[in-house]
Amino acid sequence: MTQEELRAIIAHFDINGSVSEIKPLGEGLINDTYKVVTTEQDAPDYVLQRVNENVFPDVDMVMRNIKAVTTHIRKKLEEQGEDDIDRKVLRFVPLKEDAERLYAVVDGKYWRLMVFVPDAVTKQAVNAESSRAAGLAFGKFQAMLADLPVQLGETIKDFHNMEFRLQQLKEAIAKDAMGRVKEPQVQQMLREIEKREYEMCKAERMGREGVLPKRVCHCDTKVNNMMFDKRDNVLCVIDLDTVMPNFVFSDYGDFLRTGANFVSEDDPDMRAVGFNMEIFKAFTEGYLESAKGFLTPVEVENLPYAASLFPYMQCVRFLWDYLSGDKYWKVQYPQHNYIRANNQLHLLLSIEEHLPEMKEFVARCVQ
Ligand code: GN1
Ligand code: MG
């Protein structure tokens, strides 16, 4: 995209100040993101983002969800007398031509603009202290949205439905678009996946039996989807595209998947992959502190399962993309998605070793 094209998109939005510079921002794998710097001292900077309509087929639904969620949280923070609210919840900028609309369609592409949160940092890794803060923040996020008056849409259908993800993998195997299914390392991974199929689909079964509710969840609680201030306090949760009703396992499990892995999700050194119990403990304490008021005993008891579910699910999803031709996640080299899948499998193996200790710890937290 040229600067002129980007400026023409920004012109649709009701911004303060005038644009001086637009530069790429962040390392998200799904949406394209830019920082929009304004000339005036007192005007905020902005973040311009193109929403990937291949991943989010109903952008209007995404933006309606986001509007409902950010408005509700803003109201709560105001009622609680919080200061500095613009750094604690994202503010999306409406269109000049329609103050109710939070996105512009330009040449068939979907764009949105939000106020840049100043003096904030994102992290690729957390320590015990920031994990505790993250646990508190995600628990609080779910708690604040527990009384959301509107029903949110499911922006990606069956996003964290394990039965669906396995079905998708099976279809990719049947198609074998890249001829990769026969690779010995793929075969071995498929055996590991198969062994755990029944256990890992437990949440869907409990959902059907009516013993596990769906609640408003963030559904992408990665470490880098949170903003911290300079003193390591969580300011706000970002990347709200996937906010939708789901089992709470999503937010708890997906955070630990990235936060408690000793290495990043695509580190090729499998001996370095492993589950960091110190991070697990800190995050769990924080999460339960803010969430135990609304969690049911079944939800609490299954948190260790949730921690194993997400590496498993991500292994299945990365392998699905590897077998289908790397269309979903950007790859830097041909084996990248396989390496990611293998990394997640090794994380799962490490979690399985710790499960008894994890169960004990969770039980102690709620005693
Ligand atoms: C995607 O966009 P990003 O990087 O925050 C994905 C997550 C995966 C993650 C794995 C909408 O998240 O579910 O866990 O990649 N988001 C979507 O890196 O598929
Ligand atoms: Mg992100």
Image: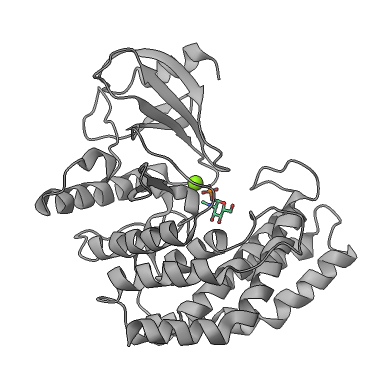
Q: Is residue 288 above or below residue 23?
A: below
Image-quadrant location for residue 193? bottom right
Total numbered badges shown on the rendered structure: 0
Q: Is residue 325 above or below residue 348?
A: above
Q: Quadrant of the C terminus?
A: bottom left
Near-viewer residue (25 or 319) = 25
Left or right for 208, reference 194:
left
Left or right for 336, reference 141:
right
Residue 81: x %, y % from top left? 11, 50
Q: Quadrant of the N terminus?
A: top right
Near-viewer residue (85 or 246) = 85
Image-quadrant location for residue 152? bottom left
Left or right for 99, reference 155:
left
Q: Residue at x 68, y 46 (%)?
A: 327
Residue 2: x %, y % from top left? 54, 15
Residue 252 shows in the view: yes
Q: Is residue 106 above or below residue 289?
A: above
Near-viewer residue (172 or 335) = 335
Q: Residue at x 66, y 74 (%)?
A: 350
Q: Residue at x 64, y 48 (%)?
A: 328
Which color scheme does this rendered protein use?
one colour
Residue 283: x %, y % from top left? 43, 67
Q: Is residue 85 above or below residue 160?
A: above
Residue 159 shows in the view: no
Residue 47: x %, y % from top left? 40, 30
Image-quadrant location for residue 165? bottom right
Q: Residue at x 38, y 72 (%)?
A: 285
